[in-house]
Amino acid sequence: MDSKGLSLKAGSLPLLLLLVSNLLLCKSVASLPVCPSGAANCQVSLRDLFDRAVILSHYIHNLSSEMFNEFDKRYAQGKGFFTKTINSCHTSSLPTPDDKEQAQQTKHEDLLNLVLTVLRSWNDPLYHLVAEMRGLQEAPDTILSRAIEIEEQNKQLLEGMEKIVGQVQPGVKENEVYSVWSGLPSLQMADEDTRLFAFYNLLHCLRRDSNKIDNYLKLLKCRLIYNNNC
């Protein structure tokens, strides 16, 4: 190999390493199990648990935003769906803080339990979202793949939050509280516009709730790990 070839390869090595690093991050950012598979009595520090939870929640919110935007462009243009989504989320009845200032005034125990409740409230709708989206006419693979990924990562985040609550509130018995979703019949309607709105509304609510969870977890991490010095 001549010196020119060696020079080109050497010069491109940092860029190649950066590209490989970014690719690995994209593949692994959501693969953050709380404990290694099969590990018994696994102990993870509260700081590490929050680090993983914040990464996961941000990842889920990004995916949900991308999925909603793509669905909106493909199926909802000119249909006036957005005006119908006001207070139509199945989690709207949950007492969530209205803004950042109100969230900062909320006890951390209440915020932690709220995050758990919201995550549990999405288990059922995410399962059916994936199942019904498989039958959506001409649904792009990108939308379906994001739905599948979000369903899986919601479970991972819920597991992590249960670990966090167990460390922050040891000995406190958890209640399996969640908001019931009853939107499956709408996802299965024969009328196309009604069915598309049901998908649109669910994706809109998912984007909204994933943003709330992301913000609450960042606030909780700042408060509990850094004593509000962030």
Image: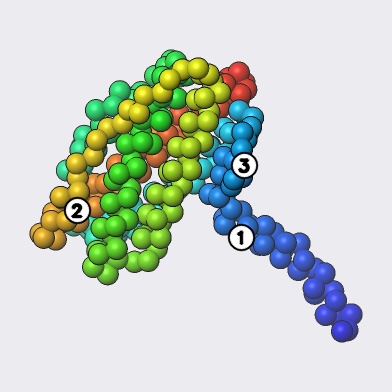
Q: Is residue 42 left or right of residue 161?
A: right
Eye-nearest disc, 2 or 1: 2
Badge 1, how many Cα within 10 Å: few under 14, some, many 20+?
Answer: few
Mark 3 or mark 2: which is in front? Answer: 3
Residue identifier under label 3: 39
Report whether residue 74 is seen: no
Q: Residue at x 48, y 32 (%)?
A: 161
Give residue 28's position: percent from left, percent from top.
59, 53
Looking at the rendered structure, the secondary structure element under dot 1 is helix
SS for callout 2: helix
Name the residue nearer the viewer: 191 or 168.
168
Q: Earlier in the sequence, mark 3 or mark 1?
A: 1
Residue 201 pos. (x, y %): 24, 46
Q: Name the residue under label 2.
A: 187
User: Which quadrant holds the C terminus?
Assistant: top right
Residue at 80 percent across and 68 percent down: it is: 11
Question: Of the residues shown, which amino acid type is indicated by label 3?
Answer: Ala
* Amino acid type assigned to the residue bearing label 2 in the image: Leu
Q: Residue at x 45, y 25 (%)?
A: 112
Q: Residue furthest left?
A: 191
Q: Which mark is residue 106?
A: none
Quadrant that contains the N terminus: bottom right
Q: Is residue 62 above or below residue 136?
A: above
The residues bearing labels 3 and 1 have C-alpha atoms spaced at a distance of 28 Å
Instruction: Give the numbered dot on residue 23.
Output: 1
Residue at the image position 29 percent from the left and 63 percent from the top: 134
Q: How many other residues sit within 10 Å of disc 2, few (<14), some (14-19) or many (≥20)?
A: many
x, y percent for residue 114: 38, 26
